[in-house]
Amino acid sequence: MCGIVAYIGPRDATPIIMNGLKRLEYRGYDSAGMATIDAGTINIRLRCR
């Protein structure tokens, strides 16, 4: 199974997505990634255990 968190809106997406990923933590996922778009630039953050 997978867990997906997404946000589209005017607020800063990073804390919203991080909170969503933390809520998935209890399910036992062993890796996570996050991508955001800021001023047309895609920023990718990966964390693998």
Image (cartoon, grey):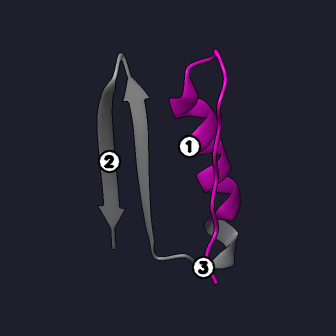
Cβ atoms at labels 2 and 1 below 8 Å apart: no
Assign a secondary structure to mark 3.
loop
Residue at figure coordinates x 64%, y 68% from the top left: 3
Where does the N terminus fall, quadrant-wise?
Answer: bottom right
Q: What residue does disc 3 label?
A: 28
Alpha carbons under labels 3 and 1: distance apart = 16 Å
Q: Reading the chain from its start, which is encountered first: label 2 or label 1?
A: 1
Does 44 appear above or below 39? Answer: below
Residue at figure coordinates x 43%, y 49% from the top left: 34
Q: Reading the chain from its start, which is encountered first: label 3 or label 1?
A: 1
Please state the horizontal and vertical placement of residue 18, each as a whole percent of the image: 56, 43
Q: Callout 1, which amino acid?
A: Met
Tell me: 41 left or right of 18: left
What is the number of the mark on residue 18? 1
Q: Which of 47 and 38 is in front in this view?
A: 38
Alpha carbons under labels 3 and 2: distance apart = 20 Å
Q: Which residues are the magenta region?
A: 1-24
Does 3 appear above or below 13? Answer: below
Q: What residue does disc 2 label?
A: 45
Q: Callout 3, which amino acid?
A: Gly
Residue at figure coordinates x 40%, y 30% from the top left: 37
Cβ atoms at labels 3 and 2 below 8 Å apart: no
Residue at figure coordinates x 65%, y 31% from the top left: 8
Q: Callout 2, which amino acid?
A: Arg
Assign a secondary structure to mark 2.
strand
Q: Which of 26 and 7 is in front in this view?
A: 7
Q: Which of marks 3 and 2 is in front?
A: 2
Q: Reading the chain from its start, which is encountered first: label 3 or label 2?
A: 3
